[in-house]
């Protein structure tokens, strides 16, 4: 049976975890805001430079050359921005996942302690019920581990796909810019 101190310690740990996760979420938001500010400043500066270049154009051929020269850097910058945004998101998700896995392992350990304690104090003849309970807990733990592995594999596949799409888009833009 749980004591008041054990319940209070559990609540305190849960509150500390909540505040820790909240701080991690705010760190992710701060990184995204910083990225957006940096990208906005760079875009404004580039727009100013591009406008100055447009004002000095003397003929249509020079205008076309100027325009085609903008596409490749724009695609590369867009890919870099997307990559940075993706890194922030996956970093935050990894922090949440790591914390969740730690909490789940701790909860499993505590629950198994309760089951073992209950088994020691169980009346004679309840061995079968205790064995079923332990088997059920073990099956649930195995299922959780399988889900965690599947999520990690899906994340790795998504990251590989993101990298492939970003590389393809950048290369396609380079090829198009060279043709002009």
Image (cartoon, rainbow, N blue to C red):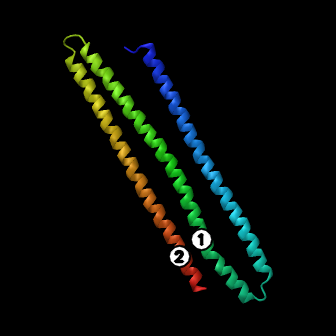
Instruction: Work out which residue is located at the far top of the displayed protein and give it.
Output: 123
| The quarter of the displayed image where residue 130 is located | top left
| The quarter of the displayed image where residue 144 is located | top left
Answer few, some or many: residues within 10 Å of disc 1's Cα (few below 14, many 20 plus, some between 14 and 19): some
Residue 71 position (above or below residue 130): below
Q: Which residue is drawn at 71% across and 62% down?
A: 41
Q: Which of marks 2 and 1 is in front?
A: 1
Answer few, some or many: residues within 10 Å of disc 2's Cα (few below 14, many 20 plus, some between 14 and 19): some
Q: Residue at x 39, y 49 (%)?
A: 152
Whether residues under marks 2 and 1 lie with C-beta atoms below 8 angstroms apart, the answer is: yes
Query: Where does the C terminus fall, quadrant-wise?
Result: bottom right
Residue 106 position in % (x across, y down): 38, 31
Mark toward the start of the polypeptide (2 vs 1): 1
The answer to whether 171 appears left or right of 142 in the picture is: right
Residue carrying label 1: 75
Residue carrying label 2: 172
Query: Where does the N terminus fall, quadrant-wise?
Result: top left
Residue 64 position (above or below residue 107): below
Residue 142 position in % (x across, y down): 30, 38
């Amino acid at each position: 049976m749980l004591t008041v101190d054990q319940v209070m310690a559990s609540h305190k740990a849960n509150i500390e975890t909540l505040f820790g996760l909240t701080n991690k979420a705010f760190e992710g938001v701060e990184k995204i805001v910083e990225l957006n500010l940096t990208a906005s400043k760079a875009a404004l500066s580039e727009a100013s430079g591009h406008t100055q270049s447009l004002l000095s154009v003397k003929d249509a051929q020079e205008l076309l050359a100027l325009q085609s020269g903008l596409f490749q850097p724009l695609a590369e910058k867009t890919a870099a921005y997307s990559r940075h945004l993706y890194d922030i998101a996956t970093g935050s998700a990894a922090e949440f996942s790591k914390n969740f896995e730690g909490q789940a392992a701790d909860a499993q350990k505590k629950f198994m302690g309760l089951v073992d304690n209950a088994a020691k104090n169980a009346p004679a003849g309840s061995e079968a019920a205790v064995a079923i309970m332990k088997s059920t807990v073990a099956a649930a733990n195995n299922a959780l581990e399988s889900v965690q592995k599947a999520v990690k594999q899906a994340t790795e596949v998504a990251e590989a796909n993101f990298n492939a799409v970003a590389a393809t888009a950048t290369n396609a833009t380079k090829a198009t810019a060279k043709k002009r």
